[in-house]
Amino acid sequence: MNVSGNPNGRTVLFSHGFGCNQDVWRHVTPAFLEEYRVVLFDLTGAGASDLAAYDRAKYDSLDGYADDVIEILKELDAKDAIFVGHSVSSMIGVLAANRDPSRVGTLVLVGPSARYINDGDYVGGFEEADIMALLDDLDANYLGWSSAMAPAIMGNPDRPELGEELTGNFCSTDPEIARHFARVTFLSDNRRDLGEVSVPTLVLQCSEDLIAPATAGCYVHEHIPDSTFVNLSATGHIPNLSNPAELSEAILGFLR
């Protein structure tokens, strides 16, 4: 865990998505340091976290990660914190806010999806067979899957260095943990949790997002009471890297 910024400011906790680590926020957080207490951390099993602490039973659902968020905020004695969650961490934030809205007082959801698999009228972006094939490919050859998928997830083909960075992040993750986390992520269904959110929420949507299409972001917005929806000009699924200035500006505009 890394704490910086204004020690007397409101706490902002940044949480990364699948295959990434806290470094993915390095271009975003400078805009917050003067006004806020900025907290970065790696999800258990990712980055520099203690891999020995990865308990498959605990992390067999996103609830285990939500418990960790509450634990971090308690350790910091933080109340009314702002939780900024990217990708799967968006739903981790939703679960944490529903569990303890006194600790998580505001949600910022970047590229969220409450369910990745299409279901009747719900369009998450993937057929179940596609997700199962994706997970089978990941199980068979994680490094090969990472090299192929990371650039597609990043988008922005005119900036190949971004895809290379994401590939490096994916490939530095323990394959066994990554396989398990991928199944938990892509098979999760948090649609029922959205209506329980009681804190101010900002939903940020990118265009040309392979992982969380506009239909998924709009669903999250429509089912979280009184949430605010902003379409970013950023493309791809990782605006923290592809357009951090726009992302920072959108978050700060909402908070102020």
Image (cartoon, helix red, strand yellow):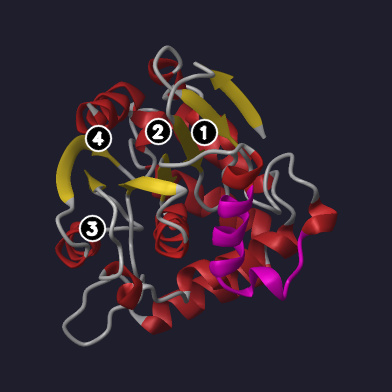
- Dot 3 or dot 4, earlier in sequence: 3
Mark 1, secondary structure of its residue: helix
Distance from disc 3 to disc 1, alpha carbons, whole Å, reads: 21 Å
Please state if 237 lies on the left or on the right of 16 as rendered.
left
Q: Which mark is residue 240?
A: 2
User: Between tags 3 and 4, which lies in front?
Assistant: 3
Distance from disc 4 to disc 2, alpha carbons, whole Å, reads: 9 Å
Mark 2, secondary structure of its residue: helix
Please tell me which residue is depicted at 23% across the width and 30% down the height of the picture.
250
Distance from disc 4 to disc 1, alpha carbons, whole Å, reads: 15 Å
Please tell me which residue is depicted at 15% across the width and 48% down the height of the picture.
229
User: Between tags 4 and 2, which lies in front?
Assistant: 2
- Dot 3 or dot 2, earlier in sequence: 3
Distance from disc 2 to disc 1, alpha carbons, whole Å, reads: 6 Å
Asked if the residues shown at circle 2 and circle 1 are in contact, with their CB atoms under 8 angstroms apart, the answer is yes
Please tell me which residue is depicted at 57% across the width and 44% down the height of the picture.
73
Mark 4, secondary structure of its residue: strand
Read off the residue under disc 4: 234
